[in-house]
Image (spheres, rainbow, N blue to C red):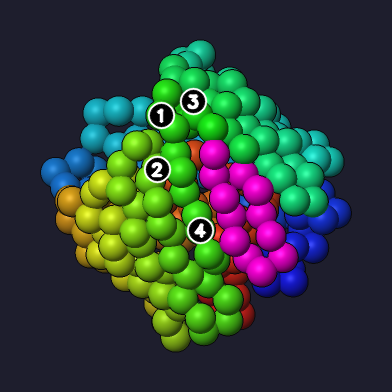
């Protein structure tokens, strides 16, 4: 947990490495195929996300205490600013308004308030710490959130509701150093294989919060061997 707070306090982006890194995600979600590629270097990321027939291409620029997210289709233009106890999100994602404030405390709690994709969330996230489970409660996109984030020996187990949809997903690191996501995500069966030469917390955060959070371990998911 100290690592998370340290990142926020000094407003650095240690999660975006100086050398180029990659995350490749392949598999299925319901009847749709999933093919995601994330490429990162010192100050930028490119997200190329294809899910079924839908494609999204995001360009992410990072500075000392801020992030700019834009999309190839012009529907996303989001500014994120980081401060020791607050994160601000302003602009739009997928053509919908975002004007969001996230306050965070030293004990690992995040509070969401404002507007996210035209909805008004009222969400609390207590991040997992060591072997202690985390939990998201409240409302996100105006829908119920009651989700447990449970540390396991090989990864994390997500169980509960997010955005009003059921999640029952086992995320683990395999012996061949790939990652697997198996179970249910937003009421649909999910089976993903992930290869990466960097931490995959960005992928998990994107699945749960529906937006990139590059360069910061927002949910405190990084741990030895994962």
The image shows residue 83 at horizontal and vertical percentages of 78, 45
Q: Secondary structure at mark 4?
A: strand
Label disc, if present, on residue 130 of the rendered structure: none
Q: Answer with mark 4 or mark 3, whichever residue precedes in sequence.
A: 3
Compared with 36, 221 (above or below) is: below
Q: Secondary structure at mark 2?
A: strand
Question: At 50% from the left edge and 54% from the top edge, which residue is drawn?
Answer: 124
Residue holding disc 3: 93
Residue holding disc 2: 140
Q: Examine the residues drawn in magenta and state their main secondary structure.
A: strand
Residue holding disc 1: 119
Q: Nearer the viewer, residue 8 or 32?
A: 8
Could you tell me if the residues under marks 1 and 4 are in contact, i.e. CB atoms within 8 Å?
A: no
Could you tell me if the residues under marks 4 and 3 are in contact, i.e. CB atoms within 8 Å?
A: no
Compared with 197, 24 (above or below) is: above
Q: What crowding class fits label 3: few (fewer than 14 Cα within 10 Å), some (14-19), or many (20 or more)?
A: many
Q: Answer with mark 2 or mark 4, whichever residue precedes in sequence.
A: 4
Residue holding disc 4: 125
Depth check, mark 2 against mark 3: the one in front is 2
The image shows residue 202 at horizontal and vertical percentages of 54, 52
Marks 2 and 1, how far apart at CA: 8 Å
């Amino acid at each position: 947990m100290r690592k998370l707070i340290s990142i926020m306090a000094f407003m650095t982006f240690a999660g975006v490495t100086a050398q180029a890194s990659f995350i490749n995600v392949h598999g299925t979600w319901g009847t749709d195929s999933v093919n995601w590629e994330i490429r990162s270097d010192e100050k930028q990321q490119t997200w190329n996300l294809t899910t079924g027939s839908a494609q999204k291409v995001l360009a992410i620029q990072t500075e000392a205490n801020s992030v700019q997210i834009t999309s190839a289709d012009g529907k996303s233009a989001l500014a994120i600013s980081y401060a020791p106890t607050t994160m601000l999100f302003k602009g739009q994602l997928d053509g919908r308004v975002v004007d969001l404030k996230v306050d965070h405390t030293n004990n690992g709690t995040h509070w969401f308030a404002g507007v996210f994709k035209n909805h008004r969330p009222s969400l609390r996230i207590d991040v997992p710490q060591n072997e202690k489970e985390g939990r998201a409660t409240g409302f996100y996109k105006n829908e119920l959130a009651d989700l447990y984030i449970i540390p396991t020996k090989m990864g994390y187990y997500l169980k509960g509701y997010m955005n009003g949809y059921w999640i029952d997903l086992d995320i683990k690191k395999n012996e061949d150093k790939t990652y697997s996501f198996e179970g249910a995500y937003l009421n649909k069966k999910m089976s993903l294989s992930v290869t990466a030469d960097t931490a995959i917390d960005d992928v998990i955060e994107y699945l749960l919060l529906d937006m990139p959070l590059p360069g910061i371990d927002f949910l405190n998911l990084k741990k030895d061997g994962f």
